[in-house]
């Protein structure tokens, strides 16, 4: 699964705008977020769709982001884990 390219990130721009509002997150490169200097969230694309990898503890969890419901689930998790 490759990292999301420019076109994929364009389609995720409304989500990226919401992620940029989360205190403590730093977007070092478009679509790649860090928290306290550590990788926190980034996106992938493949034939099955778009996915976000979100650090929930020591590991990353994979979240699909292909529907409004999936995007909201990711935002809830990012807000919860990003504020710790």
Image (spheres, rainbow, N blue to C red):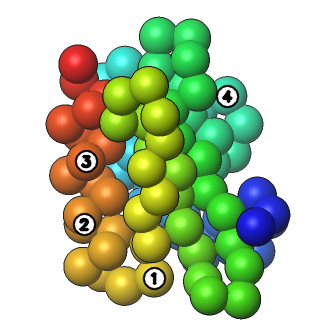
Image position of 84 (left or right of 5): left
**Residue pictured at 44% horizontal, 25% vertical:** 58
Tell me the residue at 45%/82% (across/down). Answer: 66
Image coordinates of residue 17 in percent, x first then y, are 43, 52
| Residue 74 horizontal/vertical position (percent) | 32, 58
Instruction: Say above or below: 48 vs 51.
Output: below
* Mark 1–mark 3 CB contact (< 8 Å): no
Tell whether label 4 touches label 2 (CB within 8 Å).
no
Q: CA distance from mark 1 to mark 4?
A: 23 Å
Reply above or below: 64 against 26: below
Please, what secondary structure does the residue beneath circle 4 have?
Answer: strand
Q: Circles 1 and 2: CB distance less than 8 Å? A: no
Using the image as rendered, state which of residue 60 and residue 41 is in the foreground: 60
The residue to which callout 4 is attached is 28
Question: Local crowd at mark 1 within 10 Å, few (<14), some, or many (≥20)?
Answer: some
Of callouts 1 and 3, the N-terminal one: 1
Tell me the quarter of the image containing the C terminus: top left
Image position, residue 11 (x, y; %)? 59, 76
CA–CA distance between discs 1 and 3? 16 Å
Is residue 16 shown to the viewer in this render?
A: no
Local secondary structure at mark 3: helix
Q: Counting residues from the N terminus, which is met first, the one under dot 1 or under dot 4?
A: 4
Q: What residue is disc 3 on?
A: 77
- In the picture, residue 9 is in which quadrant? bottom right
Query: What residue lies at 52% left-to-right and 51% top-to-bottom?
Result: 53
Residue 66, label in figure: 1
Q: Mark 2 highlights which residue?
A: 72
Q: Earlier in the sequence, mark 1 or mark 2?
A: 1
The image shows a total of numbered marks equal to 4
Report, in whole angstroms, how far the alpha carbon at label 1 lies from the one at label 2. 10 Å
**Distance of mark 2 from mark 3, alpha carbons?**
9 Å
């Amino acid at each position: 699964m490759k990292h999301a390219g420019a076109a994929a990130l364009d389609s995720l721009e409304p989500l990226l705008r919401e992620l940029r509002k989360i205190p403590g997150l730093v977007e070092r490169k478009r679509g790649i977020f860090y928290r306290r200097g550590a990788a926190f969230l980034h996106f992938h694309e493949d034939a099955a769709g778009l996915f976000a990898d979100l650090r929930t503890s020591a590991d990353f969890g994979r979240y699909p982001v292909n529907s409004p419901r999936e995007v909201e689930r990711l935002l809830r998790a990012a807000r919860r884990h990003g504020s710790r």
